[in-house]
Amino acid sequence: MGGFADTIMARLDALGAISAEPGRITRIYLSPEQARANELVMGWMREAGMSARVDAVGNVVGRVEGPVPGGPALVVGSHLDTVRDAGRFDGPLGVVTGIACVAALLREGVRLPFAIEVIGFADEEGTRFNATLTGSRAFAGRVDPGLLETRDAAGVTVAQALEAFGLDPAHLDAAGRRPEEILAYLELHIEQGPMLEQAGLPVGVVTAISGATRMAVTLVGEAGHAGTVAMPCRRDALAGAAECILAVERLCRARSDLVGTVGRVAASPGAVNVIPGQAVFSLDLRSPDDAVRLDAFAAIEAEWRGIAQRRGLSLSMARMHEASAVPCDPALTERIAAAIAAEGQPVMRLPSGAGHDGMAVAAIAPIAMIFVRCRGGISHNPAEFASLPDIEAGARVMLATLRDLIRNPPTGV
């Protein structure tokens, strides 16, 4: 595999140049930029010796057949869409590395006992329609019935965008795959966190993808004159929100397997000389253990209600998102761990706090993930970076894992 990191990086640069915004990387679902990226990636797939197509939801699918045409496939994938003003590595690194590994296997003349596919999922980030994992949910046959009527900021529905992209919204279910068609799913991704860097390691193996609870929270008090209402008489909604936010931080810091974030706060009426009568804020709570997350939310809610009662505020909450944690398959995870150890590296096992396409694919196949160190743990940011040696290490681990699966196929092959 030596030397492939240069090719991988060059291809990431080529994809990074396809953007809706000059000087930034923005490539959203069903956009002209996504169409250009799909064509570029399909060219690389064909160059590697794969067939290539775009499926009914816009995913790019590269395939090398096994001994039985149309037989079950081992799938390597990640996503090709981005957030706005993104980095080069989040998503595309896994797709491009998958293509490089398949190319290496075919050059070696390896006899495949099953088909291998590389998938570039179309819409993991949900940037355009605020509906994440659209490509992988469709792949797993789990499309939300209301998806087609979801609108973007310009009022365009998913159905209209599919038609403009050259796809038929009436046949969206054609992207769906059955469990018997997929042997396993592997994904290589930058860590998007600092743990590998802190440990001084280039790669790690993922144990689980964290579940998440997201809430929109409203506290209502009473607006009043900033100069005339005495401090003991105030029902300051923003001060109550501040206390609630600090409670989230305190409770989540007490556990190593839990993170909580309040990323949005708004106060009204929003004047410098008016006591805030209303405060609205968000909560994002994540853990690889659903019991930990649910217990933490119950504790947070209890604290919030106590704060609201003590301050004379009303509290209301609306759930915006709820996703269960997805454990990685133990047998596949051990194969990746063995590949890391064979490279002479300590095996670091760590959960993913970020969501990935594997969360959706897990509905129809066992999944496993390889993490590659990223500088500073920075992601969703132009400063996102993985070094050539780390990319090389990740690619070697992926290739070794594929070779192991070819020598010792998963049950059922």
Image (cartoon, rainbow, N blue to C red):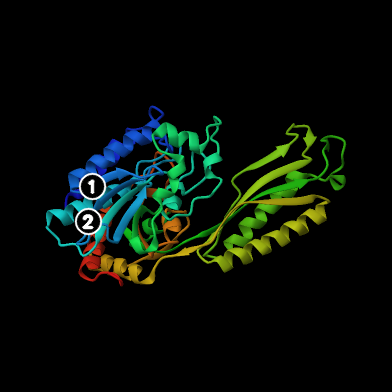
Which comes sooner in the sequence, label 1 or label 2? 1
Indicate the secondary structure of the residue bearing disc 2. loop
State whether residue 340 appears in this view.
Answer: yes
Please identify the quadrant where the C terminus is shown.
Answer: bottom left
Measuring from the top left, give residue 54's x and y in whole percent: 33, 43
Q: Residues within 10 Å of mark 2 (few under 14, many from 20)?
A: some
Left or right of 241? Residue 127 is left
Q: Does residue 18 sit above or below 195 in this rendering?
A: above
Q: Which residue lies furthest to the front in this view?
A: 170
Residue 51: which disc? 1
Please identify the quadrant where the N terminus is shown.
Answer: bottom left
Measuring from the top left, give residue 345's x and y in whole percent: 27, 65
State whether residue 1 appears in this view.
Answer: no
- Write the residue at 81% across / 45% down: 221
Q: Mark 2 points at which residue?
A: 65
Question: Tag 1: residue type?
Answer: Ser
Left or right of 281? Residue 81 is left
- Write the residue at 37% across / 58% down: 196
Name which quarter of the figure residue 153 lies in.
Answer: top right
Q: Are marks 1 and 2 in contact (CB under 8 Å)?
A: yes
